[in-house]
Amino acid sequence: MEMHNARCTCRNCPAADFGANKRSIGPAIIACHRRPEIGFVDPETITFEECPQWRSTPYGYLLQNMRVMILGIDGYLGWTLALWLGTLGCEISGVDNYARRDWVKERGAHTVVPISRMTERLRAANEVLGIEVNFRELDIFNDRDRLQEFIDEIKPEAIVYYGECPSAPYSMIDVEHASYVQQNNVLGTLGVLFMMRDLVPQTSLVKLGTMGEYGTPPTGRPLFEGMFPDEAILRWNDREWNLGGEITPRDPGSFYHLSKVHDTFNTAKACRFWGLRSYDIMQGVIYGVNTPQVAADPRLRTRLDIDEWFGTVINRFVAQAVVGFPLTIYGSGEQIRGFIGLEDGMQCVTRLIAHPPAPAQYDVVNQMSGFNSIKQLADTVARIASKEFHIPVTIQRVENPRVEYDVHPYEPIYNKLPEQFGFEPRVQLDDEIYRMLELLTQPDIKQRIEEKKHLILPRTWWSGEKKLVESLEIIEEIKYEASA
Ligand code: USQ
């Protein structure tokens, strides 16, 4: 079967130099940074399939030794991606200021899967996987000059932006936290857009947004991939307009989600103003602990948070089950979210890097592999924990400290990744929950969950109140039965 990016041409390639012959009049021509010997060519003539610089991989053609810079390389996703892409032959560089470690520490929590210091991580990546990561410790917002220098030195061919604070509850603690999250996220990204304009305008920016930008519109309007499809019509007062291509309305659920909405507009405009290229990923809630690389050695493990601020719902439910803490469904549990396993998230980003947007193209993909209600997830975790691990599990409903629709229609559209980029989900929810239970029941990890059990019940209310939520009802007790 033909690879998804086989017919992409130099137009999409970060090695194409569009400024090569500025004085020429007539059709655009390019030179190639990687193959100067080909001279000036029409950007549409050579395809990725034909170009010897693009090598076949399971995720499409990938530039040989492609230079990928990961902003936020020390986090849950950043570290995992560094090892994943390194194994595929990419030259990895990355920056981080260890903020995620600090935020979690500030809340008195810790990653329940122990992770190594960066120096140890880098050494282990080299020893175990033969990957050299070019790392620089810096703050994307505060150390702009140093980041600029680093980008200029590396000249990355793709930049993956994972350097934002990802927590809705953290952004709702108080005005300091809300301001910090918006400054770090929105202004950090804005700075990078300017750097790309000045230093690497041909590089694609793969930027992490969130499905939460859309919210859950009570009208039931489908959650299109960023923009309205061509056929969308607005009717009003006997008149009609075609909405195709317009950014859809957003209804974000926290000051964190709002920061991502602002990024959406800043990034879309930078592509429009300066011809930059970007894929904005609206990612569903991510879960899991497993890729072949992070599982290869304990020093290569990625973090896993389970506290109310940085733990996402499936990861939290699994940890709660392991220590016998009743699973915490907020509100009715009927709220529905899109989800994606860690390894599937890595596959999607790889495919996007392999298929760069054309100049000035801003595009959005909804990155998820399925959707479930919170109640369904709690039931699934409880079933696997009790049946396969003989752990009795209780599920409780607690007050919902957030402001969100409890019951709502949900129709996400998530066709682009499978249809245009060849994404095939491989992570099955049940299998990944099983793998997480295997890891989290290990005595040292279970002990680390026990130590932070007091940080499971949420106390950050969207209203500003500071009190632990109260349990509303115990809705299920699932016990393992030997005959089952
Ligand atoms: N929830 C529970 N019980 C819990 C934790 C969460 O019922 O113990 C519910 C929440 O009320 C919410 C849903 O589960 O309805 C998801 O909550 P979450 O904390 O797993 O995820 P969220 O706050 O939405 O944020 C996470 C990531 C964020 C990403 C987002 C994708 O932290 O970075 O943007 O997932 S999305 O949800 O699609 O916006």
Image: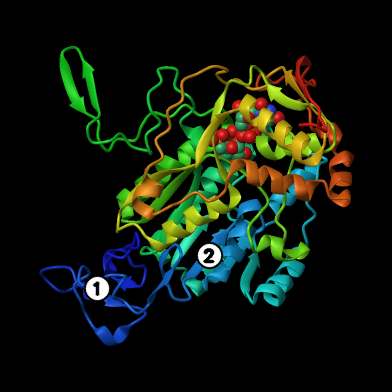
- Give SS at disc 2: strand
Position of 463 with respect to 156 (left or right) is right
- Amino acid under disc 1: Ile
Q: Is mark 1 within 8 Å of ligand 1?
A: no
Residue 171 visible here: no
**Which residue sits at x=50%, y=66%?**
68
- Amino acid under disc 2: Met
Number of on-image labels: 2
Mark 2 Cα shell of 10 Å, populated few (<14), some (14-19), many (≥20): many
Q: Which label lies toward us, 2 or 1?
A: 1
**Which residue sits at x=58%, y=53%?**
343
Most distant residue in the left direction:
26
Q: Is residue 246 above or below residue 216?
A: below
Q: Residue 61 location, x and y as percent?
A: 39, 68
Instruction: State how far apart marks 2 and 1 are (Cα).
Output: 26 Å
- Give SS at disc 1: loop
Q: Residue 26 location, x and y as percent?
A: 10, 69
Q: Which of the two discs, 2 and 1, labels the residue nearer the N terminus? A: 1
Q: Which quarter of the figure is the N terminus placed in?
A: bottom left
Q: Residue 473 location, x and y as percent?
A: 76, 14
Q: Ligand 1 lies in which image quarter?
A: top right
Badge number at residue 46: 1
Observer-nearest residue: 5 or 436?
Answer: 436
Most distant residue in the bottom direction:
37
Position of 34 with respect to 167 (left or right) is left
Badge number at residue 168: none
